[in-house]
Structures are given as structure tokens and as C-alpha cells.
Image: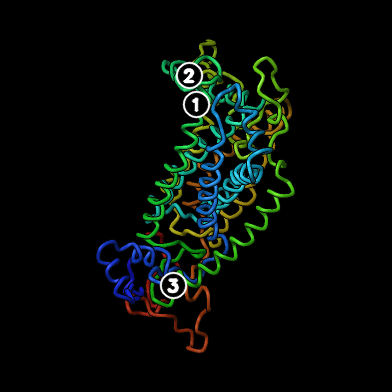
Amino acid sequence: MSFAWAKQYEPQSAFTKWIDEKLPLPRLVYNAIGAGYPVPRNLNYMWNFGVLAGFCLVLQIVTGVVLAMHYASNTEVAFSQVEHIMRDVNYGWMMRYAHANGASFFFIVIYLHIFRGFYFSSYKAPREMIWLLGVVIFLLMMATAFMGYVLPWGQMSFWGAKVITGLFGAIPFIGEPLQTWLVGGFAPNDSTLNRFFSLHFLLPFVIAGVVILHIWALHIPGSSNPTGVEVKQESDTVPFHPYYTAKDGFGLGVFLILFTFMVFFLPNALGHPDNYIEANPLSTPAHIVPEWYFLPFYAILRAFTGDLTIPFTGIVLVQAKLLGVIGMFGSILVWFFLPWLDKSPVRSGNYRPMFKKFFWFGLVPTMIVLMICGGAPAEEPYVVISQIATAYYFLHFLVILPIVSQIEIPKPLPFSITEAVLGKDEGGAGVRVASPSSGKPAGEEPDGALQPAE
């Protein structure tokens, strides 16, 4: 994003001038997160989660590299190596707990980041690429987290790997060869652990690369804001530093308080007790569940209990297992199409009364119900409840959202971000700030109350 009023980087010494000529890294940082990056002045704490997600990624990479120094991807010793890290490696217990709880906090931050994007329509033009890259990051996170869950080689690690990799076998024609290649055999073994360890180590760096693209794409149109109104004038923005570095610093402080509390006082609260039992292929746990952050999608997977058949013939078109796999992956892939499913000219949910009701009383409770059902046994009434919740989930994105975006009457938007923050100039007889494009007061512009999404 380029604004004429953005402060330009000026080297202050001969050395910084030389660096700026040869490798303009300070200029890049200054324009990305410094005073050279103007940001909407009305961002609230829901915009802190991007920085917190970046911190979580760095935390996971650092702790993961340290843990990898002491881990052995061998089924004979993997479980004991984790115990060795906990008991014998200096501060190994802290590294392990920080890494395990860091994954949970990473997903908490990302889920809040995503739902903020849902509510404020951060996927709308001109920010579609930012959203699409964000969904790619989420998919990579899920793959990384699943592979990391297998590495401790506890009971839930082994059986979770067996169940999830078994899903690939439902894919027609290529499913079974793909499953065998991924697992390295017919059941999780040494080959599986080696593959998963390698990929678990590699994918965070891939995520970091996509995050760079995500931030790069963000800086082209600039940050969205709670009103959904685009920046029109210099008074709509403030420099990222020091205003939002201070705000992000406060948010990071609160995050670290909660995170350190979990690491030091409740380190195992988010884990599964069965994973502290060494993997045994001959003993199936009573209830196999993934980590908590996979539970909504696990509930969608289990919601498909019947085959898709041709009526009155009994001919099976799609088996229930494959339907579940399609539903689980489709529940995330549908996010890729949100920029084109939601055609409302207004971005912010604050100005969309019908959308707001369906969001708070439809989508959010549905995700909570799916999470509860995903962690519950595959029995009634949880199966029926998860089927109803799954049906509503897809209806929300594929039917309700497109219809609501066409028929609802949004509330009038403020003319500018400055007006949203400071209010109208009542002392000026109701004259509003002039539009840079027309030079006329907003009241004289056609459709001045409603600024459509670009």
C-alpha cells in the first residue's frame, strides 16, 4: 500500500546509508512494520492475532529445533526418548510443554483470526489473495500438527495415525497405494515415524514462507478495519510504529501470561491421558480422538454414516467413508470460495444486521456443537447432533451467506475511518469531510452513506 503521506526511510549515518544502498533490509523493515507503514487508526484488539500467530510460529520452530536434537524417530525408543527429554535434558520438560501447549495456543489464535475474518469479511476484494494464502497456512498447520501428534508414540499417537491415514484408503483408485506410500507399510511403523518426523520438521519452514507471502499480499491493499471503509485521507491512518507496536506488545504480554500459566501449572490439561501410555498395536483405546483443535472437522467426518445410493436400486455411488473424507476436507475448502459467495457491498458485520444474527446465533454455536460432538463417543445422540450441525455448517456458507448478502439492507456506513472514530463535525453545521475523489462533502455524493467493497 502506497500513500503520499507515508513517512519515508532516511538513513542517519554513513553506515546505514551504505547498507541501504547494498542491501536495503532496514528500509524493508521500516516500510513493513515501522513508521513507513500507515495503518487504519480504528483497529481494535481483534487485529492483534496476526502478530500473535507470528510469535507462535517462531516459538514452535525454536522449541521444535531444540526437541529434535534429542528425539529419535524409531518406534523402539521414541516414547522413551520423550521421557528422556522430560527427565534428563536441561529444561527439556519446559521445551516439551512449551511446544505441546504452543500448538494449542497457535490454533486458538488462528481460529480467532479466522473468525475475525469471517465477521469483518476480510476475504472481500481487494484482499482475496491475503485470505486464500491464510487458508493455505491453516491447511499446512493442520498437516504439521497431525504429524507432530504422532511423534510421542503414545497410544493416541499410534491409533490416531492409523485412523487418519486409513481415510486415504477411501479415495477411489489411488487411495490404497497413497495410504501405503504415506504410512510406509500397512500399519504405522518405523517408516511412518521417519516420514512424519521429516515432514513435521520441514513444514513449519514452508508455513513461514507462505506467511511472508501473506504479509506481502497484505501490504498491497493495506489492513482492513472494523468499519470496512477504505482509507481516504491521511487522518484515517497512524504509523504502525509506535502506535500498533505498543498495542501488539500489550496483547503479546497478555498472551504470554496465559501461555506461561498453562506451561507451568496446567501443562497436560489440553492433552489426552492415553498418550502417556506407550503405543500398543494390540490394545485399542476405548475412544480414539484427535487433538482438540481437530474436533469440529472430526465430527463432520463421523457425521456421514450412510452410503450414497441410487434410490430403489441399492447401487452404491459413494461409500460413507469417502463421503466423510469429502465432507471433512470440503468444510475447509469452502473457505476458498468465500470472496465470491458473499456478494454484499458492505464488509463489516457491524453494519449487516441479518448477517450478524446468522453469524453469532448460527455459525459460532454450530462450531461449538461440532467440537463437543467430535470429542464425544460415536453414539447417539451425538451422531444425530453432529449430522444436523454439519448440514447447517455447509448451508451457512453455500446457501445462507449468498442469499443474505443479496437481500439484507445494511446500516449506513460512516463516510470515513476518521468519522467512525471521532464522529461527525457537529460544529460545522453537519458538513462532513470532503471526499478525495470528488472534492464534495459526503452528503452531496450519490450513495454517500454506503461505500461498496472494491
Amino acid beneath label 1: Asn
Residue at (32, 76) in percent of width and height: 13
Q: Are marks 2 and 1 in contact (CB under 8 Å)?
A: yes
Q: Nearer the viewer, residue 191 or 346?
A: 191
Sequence-first tag of 1 and 3: 1
Q: Residues within 10 Å of mark 1 (few under 14, many from 20)?
A: some
Question: For the residue labelled by badge 3, is the local secondary structure a helix, a strand or a loop?
Answer: strand
Amino acid beneath label 2: Gly
Residue identifier under label 1? 194
Whole-angstrom CA distance, mark 1 to mark 3, is: 47 Å
Whole-angstrom CA distance, mark 2 to mark 1, is: 9 Å
Whole-angstrom CA distance, mark 3 to mark 2, is: 52 Å
Residue at (45, 61) in percent of width and height: 224
Q: Are marks 3 and 2 in contact (CB under 8 Å)?
A: no
Question: For the residue labelled by badge 2, is the local secondary structure a helix, a strand or a loop?
Answer: loop
Nearer to us of marks 3 and 2 is 2
Residue identifier under label 2? 184
Amino acid beneath label 3: Pro
Above or below for 298 versus 23: above
Q: Is residue 409 left or right of residue 254?
A: left
Question: For the residue labelled by badge 1, is the local secondary structure a helix, a strand or a loop?
Answer: helix
Above or below for 25 versus 152: below
Q: Is residue 363 visible?
A: no
Residue identifier under label 3? 239
Q: Nearer the viewer, residue 83 or 111?
A: 83
Q: Are marks 1 and 3 in contact (CB under 8 Å)?
A: no
The answer to which quarter of the image holds residue 93 is top right
Q: Quadrant of the C terminus?
A: bottom left
Q: Quadrant of the N terminus?
A: bottom left
Q: Position of residue 188 (x, y in %)?
A: 56, 20
